[in-house]
Amino acid sequence: MDKVLLIIKNILRRMLKKRSNFLLHIILPVIASVALFFVFNIGQAGKIEIGFADLDKTTSSHWLLEQMSQLDGIHLIEVQADEMNGHVVNRDVSLGIVIPDDFEAILLSGNEPFIEMMSSGQGGFATWIEKAVSLHIGNLVDIARVSGYDEHPYYNMMHKAQSGPIMLESIYVNDEAKAKEAMAETFGTYMIFLLITTSMIAFQIVDEKKKGTFARIGIAPVSKRSYTLANILVNLFIVMIQIGSVLLILNLVLQMEFHANPFIIYLILVVFAICGIGLGVMLASFSKNFTAASVLMSAVLTPSCMIAGCFWPLEFMPNYMQKAAYITPQRWTLDAIDIIQRNNSLMSVLPNLSIVICFTLLFFLIAVYRFKNQDHAIT
């Protein structure tokens, strides 16, 4: 163990000599996380943007939109019907409502019209908006029935209902769904930087193999296993500082609400970082030079992060892609963050953390097997 500690000390001394290493492993991820916080939280404190497309343009559709506009906390934006899905996917609006062109005709025929609504599925406000729309449509159905489905009495009763003695009192309810969604997206993208940082150990090991360090320590008192373990511990130490710095700045400086115990969030990210280090060691075992290591990192990291939903919500992907996401440790980590937001208990995320640890063990076992069955000296 003393030899491992001595190697760790030498590796840290060598890394700290280069300011670029400190910038890459500590400063850059912190700056990136702060930038992501601002990107995902722009407009979070404002009103919920609701896109609407009125294809009917009748008194009934105008009445419905007027009732919706009086709800506190929402802002209606007119959008073209054929562009609605794109606006929802791009997060220009949080929810899209399309009123069909036969809306009033269906009401006066004695039936209840169907309103098309679309959302990303991330905000808890969507259910509230849907219920509000259904309530107002139900009122129009009742008015049409009482008026005998005659236009003139129908319009008169609609006007009386709008300006009559019935008063509604609205109160503001703090909806944490958007804030939680922003936090999940921030950490999802931060995990990409974290995975890149931890996988850099692959380049360190490849560099040691290229320099012949592995060959020299083969005849030295220090074993290759101890040298690799020292590299792993150094990277883990640096990443733990990085994660702690990111969480402290987000929470204390930027006042970001985690909606969960920060120490549990820290534990989740550290477990994922260890998995990333295991992945880096495995990639190093398959790489003979820097080029091979770079190609492997690009081939593994980017597609796996895309599949896992680090770049966009999982709900945007087809069902088979959503199922495939669970072959990645990123997905289990993101789910752990989502679970801890809803149930602030360490026990609730232990299954997810156990699976991430299983991924870690698999990566290390593959690396051990590869290192054991190859020539460590690169010529």
Image (tube, grey):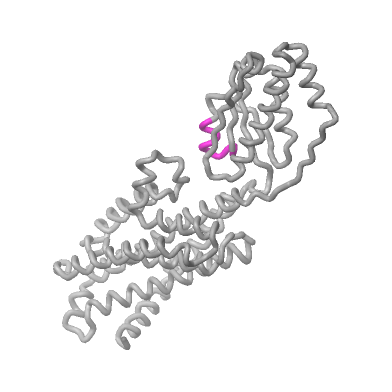
Picture quarter containing residue 283? Answer: bottom left
Residue positioned 59% across, 39% down in the render? 94
Quadrant location of the C terminus in the rendered image: bottom left
Of residues 148 and 122, the one nearer the viewer is 148
Query: Which x, y percent locates residue 118?
Result: 54, 33
**Total numbered badges shown on the rendered structure:** 0
Picture quarter containing residue 54? Answer: top right
Q: Which residue range is magenta in the image?
A: 85-94
Q: Please check the rendered image and state whether residue 179 is part of the magenta-colored stretch, yes or no.
A: no
Q: Is residue 73 above or below residue 65?
A: below
Q: Report the residue that reaches farthest toward the right.
A: 165
Of residues 3 and 11, the one nearer the viewer is 3
Q: Please check the rendered image and state whether residue 92 is part of the magenta-colored stretch, yes or no.
A: yes
Query: Which x, y percent locates residue 260?
Result: 56, 62
Of residues 72 and 27, the one nearer the viewer is 72
Q: Is 156 placed left or right of 133 in the picture?
A: right
Residue positioned 69% across, 39% down in the render? 74
Q: Is residue 268 above or below residue 105?
A: below
Residue positioned 51% across, 51% down in the render? 185
Q: Is 197 placed left or right of 180 in the picture?
A: left
Query: Which x, y percent locates residue 151?
Result: 73, 12
Query: Which x, y percent locates residue 38?
Result: 59, 53
Quadrant location of the N terminus in the rendered image: bottom left
